[in-house]
Amino acid sequence: MFTTNDILETIKMIQEENLDIRTITMGISLLDCIDSDIDRSCDKIYEKMMRLAENHVKTGEIIEKRYGIPIINKRLSVTPIAILAAAAKGSPVKFALTLQKVADAVGVNYVGGYSALVHKGFSAGDRELIESIPEALSSTTKVCSSVNIGSTRAGINMDAAALMGRIIKQSAEATANDHCFGAAKIVVFCNAVEDNPFMAGAFHGTGEPDAVINVGVSGPGVVRAKLEKMPDASIDELAEAIKKTAFKITRMGQLVGTEAAKMLGVPFGIVDLSLAPTPAVGDSVAHILEAMGLDRCGTHGTTAALALLNDAVKKGGVMASSSVGGLSGAFIPVSEDAGMIDAVNAGALSIEKLEAMTAVCSVGLDMIVVPGDTSAETLAAIIADEAAIGMVNSKTTAVRVIPAIGMKEGEVLEFGGLFGSGPVMPLSKFSSAKFISRGGRIPAPLQSLKN
């Protein structure tokens, strides 16, 4: 039962503290669209996605008006396209162009699922799809790609890590005249999840229903505002306040997801209760950490503060919904978080500190801009480091790194909108090329043997 105070508090969260639903994402299985004729497969994809998602955007807009809750993005995710590419003869780019055609027709912001799962090796269609990513992303504006190169059970496919270093570099070069944005639409995962509603890493897992609605909530501004009113609170009291706030945010996501699923006639899947920041003033995960007492995000104590935040968000969220899933916790993308950008510019936050923080946050190195002359081998080594953290700690980690072609350390790559702007961060000057060139697979850790 909601009291008057609960309702007024929620209204304040929306109007003054940037509370929103970051995305409602419809996941669609394309397994019944597999065909040896790629044109026929694309026709099946278009027909099915249009039939299921035709009213997806309209439904989100109705819910926004009905409840006064901002829904920032309406998105689609699909079965990893490499599975369809394995059966079809022809360039996988045709699939990307079909996904773009659907996105334009139904009006969604992005479509995720130009993806491959290669954590234990390459099967039919995987390498061909991965090699096509630069062309696919430079030929489309709304298609996003992800590749899973490792898992706790399988280890790390180092051949895939090396390949993805090259693909990211090529994608940035192919979109050099568009802020290198192709690389911003690629995520390289370890322990990827099947029900993630957030881009660029969303794909519809093979264990999911034929169609499903997943919701991603946000609300860093709400948590920050709460903690700023508690200047003398103990750590225990901060954790309790975050849990209660996460509970309220998640309940809103549950309401929106349930309503959207009912209106669209598909099952409700999960609420991903990740705190997803934006460049907007006050909507920053870094500012939450600073509200806890850090002079600047990145200083000593930042990893501990982030661990506290992530844990409290999860505990509050699971009390509010029995359908929590996805990634769930706190995102730390640099370009999309005003506080992170300020911390980098102040010299407080380095890529090494960010890597340490990824051991306790929701995902990993997200929206990191690096010098344009960074080698493919260095990019692959960054991917491997992050995958190792995920593999050993049995958690999802990811890398979304953008080589800013033609730019050097200290310059700024402007994206605009939710993607913000990214200061070009310095990397180690020492080479990892010999290690990356060895290829092979890093074996799964001992903790993978849980049966």
Image (spheres, rainbow, N blue to C red):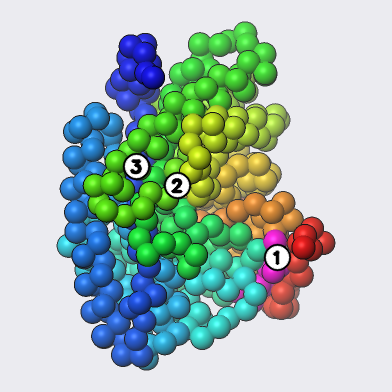
Q: Which mark is residue 270?
A: 2
Q: CA distance from mark 3 to mark 1?
A: 33 Å
Of all residues, the one furthest to the right in this rendering is: 446
User: Would residue 313 be found to the left or right of residue 335 on screen?
Assistant: right
Task: Tell me the quarter of the picture where residue 405 sits.
Answer: bottom left
Q: Amino acid at mark 1?
A: Arg
Most foreground residue, 47 or 307: 47
Q: Nearer the viewer, mark 3 or mark 1?
A: 3
Q: Residues within 10 Å of mark 1 (few under 14, many from 20)?
A: many
Q: Nearer the viewer, mark 3 or mark 2?
A: 3
Residue located beneath label 1 in the image: 153
Q: Is residue 25 above or below residue 68?
A: below
Q: Earlier in the sequence, mark 3 or mark 1?
A: 1
Relative image position of residue 108 (x, y in whole percent): 25, 54
Of all residues, the one furthest to the top in this rendering is: 232
Disc 3 element: helix
Q: Is residue 26 above or below residue 96?
A: above
Residue at position x 31%, y 55% in the image = 266
Relative image position of residue 361 (x, y in whole percent): 60, 42
